[in-house]
Amino acid sequence: MNNFSYTKIKELSDASVLLKDHKGNKAIAGGTNIVDLMKYFVVEANTLVDLNGISGMDALTETETGSVLLGALMTNAATAYHPVIEEKYPLLSRTILAGASGQIRNMATNGGNLLQKTRCYYFYDPHVPCNKREPGSGCPAVKGYNRIHAILGHSQDCIAVFPSDMCVALAALNATVHVKSAEGKRQIDFEDFHRLPGNSPEIDNNLKEGEIITAIELPNEDFSQNYSYLKLRDRSSYAFALVSVATAFKIENNRITEARIALGGVAHKPWRSYEAEEYLKGKSPDREHFAQAAEIILADAKGFKHNRFKIKLARKAIIRNCMMALEPDSQRPGAKPSL
């Protein structure tokens, strides 16, 4: 590993300055991704700026409007098992528990989850070209081994996928990302936080230089009855999704009044189709309508040599997960493991 310095910061403003004015510096919180990237020589850091000394960012708070703020330094495990999340946002709890391992969830932070890097084989190998790692060097995945890669929203410059489970649920729940820098505060709709690759795949999100995630806000909406998260992967433990689906409905008098469907493992960011969600409004919750919604979501899907199977897999996963959202909670996937 390359030599680096380390500093622990107590004030968010100090961290913002260190990260903006010294571009070789990197933030660290749980360290579950940045440390791996440094070990593989994918990322180098002059100084690791430890954010864990900043107070007030490691807890859940409820606002006067009924929304919930998840501190960016709160761990994934603490979030998933928090009674407020289990009661009001069980989709988020189930989704977090489908990701990584218990040990990693105990370390990984909410802010870090949003900022994790793709697990594309080529990105992790510094001996081969990669436009995300070295802009302009090429994307060998397009014609190479691309089994885990994108079927939606990709470009010729990058077909990598975003690996987070948690973010799929956050997309479905219309979360908002709170950020702060020396210049002030702002909020970013979750839909606008991550980016599609286009011709600049090295830019994963729309954070500005020196901005730090302080919290993730969940709106005061009730999707606690009809929800489900389905994660399809090569093995049932500690593997990233080939395709995942987060589904949440509001249903009255056997009619869908609100629908949310978000996909993971298929694009450079969590994927939603507002057209499909609008189609389902007013419809009865049944397999026929869910199948049509799946067709709408995947209308522009394009696979490559080794991952065309993901289109069919995604279609079946959408239908299956929508149907599971109608089942009693005890029959849905995602049994809660112990801490």
Image (cartoon, rainbow, N blue to C red):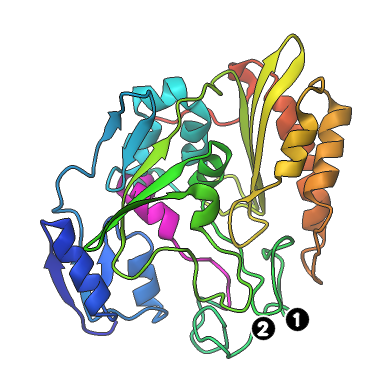
State the residue in front, 275 or 236.
275
- SS category of the residue bearing label 2: loop
Q: Which residue occupies 77% across, 40% down? A: 276
Residue 61 falls in which quadrant of the image?
A: top left
Asked whether residue 89 is in view, the answer is yes
Badge 1 element: loop
Residue 143's tag is: 1
Inspect the image, locate mark 2, and give the three-letter code of the amino acid beneath it: Pro
The total of numbered circles placed on residues is: 2
Q: Nearer the viewer, residue 215 or 189?
A: 189
Q: Return the x and y of residue 29 as percentages of the image width and height.
A: 26, 57
Asked if residue 271 is positioned above or below residue 331 in the image, the reply reads below
Instruction: Tell me: 322 left or right of 226.
Output: right
- 237 sits to left or right of 251: left
Instruction: Locate residue 2 relative to residue 137 in the image: left or right.
Output: left
| Residue 155 falls in image quadrant | bottom right
Residue 82 place in picture, x, y as percent: 34, 28
Mark 2 and mark 1 in contact? Answer it, CB < 8 Å. Answer: yes
Dot label at residue 140: 2
Q: Looking at the image, which residue is at 45% across and 31% down?
A: 219
**Magenta stretch bounds:** 104-122
Residue 200 on the magenta segment: no
Tag of residue 239: none
Mark 1, Cα crowd under 10 Å, few <14 / some 14-19 / many 20+, is few
The residue drawn where x is 53% and y is 36% is: 173
**Quadrant showing the N terminus:** bottom left
Q: Is residue 339 visible?
A: no
Label 1 is placed on what type of residue?
A: Lys
Decide: few, some or many residues near mark 2? Use Cα within 10 Å; few <14, some 14-19, many ≥20: many
